[in-house]
Amino acid sequence: MSNGSVNEGFLEKTFRLRENKTDVKTEVLAGITTFMTMAYILSVNPLILGDAGMDKGGVFTATALSAVIGTLIMALYANYPFALAPGMGLNAFFAYSVVIVMGHSWQFALTAVFLEGIVFIVLSLFGVREAIFNAIPMNLKKAVSVGIGLFIACIGLSNVGIIQQGEGVILSLGNLGERPALLAIIGLIIMGVLLAKKVKGALLIGIIVTTLIGIPMGVTEPITKIVQLPPSLKPVAFQFVWSEIFTKDMFVVLFTFLFVDVFDTIGTLVGVSSKAKMLDKDGKLPKVKQALFADAVGTVAGACLGTSTVTTYVESASGVAEGGRTGLTSFTTACLFALALIFSPIFIAVPGAATAPALILVGLFMMSPIKEIDLDDFTEAIPAFLTIIMMPLAYSIAEGIVFGMVSYVVLKLLTGKWKDISIVMFILSILFVVKFFI
């Protein structure tokens, strides 16, 4: 038997490709695409946490390794095509709120992240996060997918300046003559043509071609060296402080980390799995406990290594859009994060203008569940609409879910449809309302 046959047999047994109606080529391409759309975290996370006083080199290594650990657990334990890495938003809260505004040390913030991960492991083992996932009604699950699509598109458009914060308005059109915006538009056209012609790997091909076009435009940074040994973890790893773990400030910081991460992760899993048609007839994700466990362990490992909260990445939708359906997709992504430790100059050279068009088009792909939302029953339609619209406007998956769930409970109660409300939904909505006023 050839090595190729043995390898394919191993991959089939491990990831059950035929059962999920996919193949090795599709999964690998999807994994590469996911990595390309989220590789920016390797350069952005060290910059943000560097503002908190952390060693940027150490944070780079911690970012890559924590992504490898979390994503490998997702691949091999849950067999889902979702990738993990230190989350945007959570790293900003870490650096700018906890350290700079509240005046705590980055070691204090890192300790809060570690404790958050421990709490998440406990919640995952007892099925609490799984119960929250399953409590979200099917219409809201579909709305989360659509809302995440708009949110991703908004990220892509704003990252290259196609849209920007306006003077006297919420958003305005940016300067399309700027080179990053112009390159992103070129990339959008290239990917659009490839998709229209049904070219396999259209998003990945588009990212590569756009990156190359960016060289003469001066957007893609020239690569001066290929291989670079990763910086040491010593300045940031295991830098915990235990003297303040029972203080009020630690409780507030820990609760905020928990709240944002729980609903960002659940929202991402709901939205991407809904788009990939992984939910069963009751709207449940068969291995949601394993998926949530992966991000809990990733957070603990990330804190030990020296980085902020690890979470499931919404950019995983780009891999799903390319056909990724199993853990082989996320396994490929994890391998690329490992390679990035050595070949970081290559991966970091890919400009945001090359990945932005992919994010914008993934926004389109994520819109399809809107056709299945019940828009005739206003107790279903209004919460779904608020979920969709608040994600990009509040720039938060978590806040979109909060608006959707609270409005769902209120409308159902006031119209006599209280039987549609689960106990978990009711309790969560009360907690959300309380959170708004404290």
Image (tube, rainbow, N blue to C red):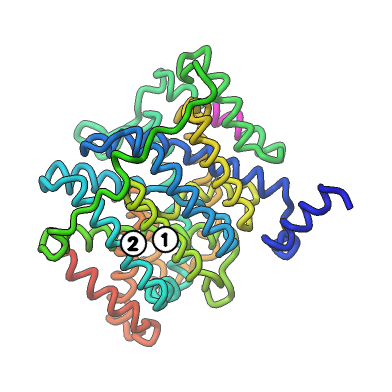
For badge 1, the amino acid type reads Val
For badge 2, the amino acid type reads Gly
What is the CA distance from the residue labelled 1 to the residue labelled 2?
Answer: 7 Å
Q: Crowding near pointer 2: few (<14 within 10 Å), some, many (20+)?
A: many
* Residue 236 position within the rendered picture, expressed as x and y whole percent measured from the top left: 29, 42
Residue at 52%, 50% (x, y): give it: 316
In the image, residue 399 lies in the stretch drawn in magenta: no
Residue 389 in view of the camera: yes
The answer to whether mark 1 and mark 2 are in CB contact below 8 A is yes
* Residue 2 position within the rendered picture, expressed as x and y whole percent measured from the top left: 87, 49
Q: Crowding near pointer 1: few (<14 within 10 Å), some, many (20+)?
A: many
Residue at 22%, 51% (x, y): give it: 109
Quadrant for residue 281, please give it.
Answer: bottom right
Question: Up-down: is 125 above or below 211?
Answer: below
According to the image, label 1 marks what residue? Answer: 297
User: In front here: 298 or 144?
Assistant: 298
Q: Which residues are magenta?
A: 187-191
According to the image, label 2 marks what residue? Answer: 117
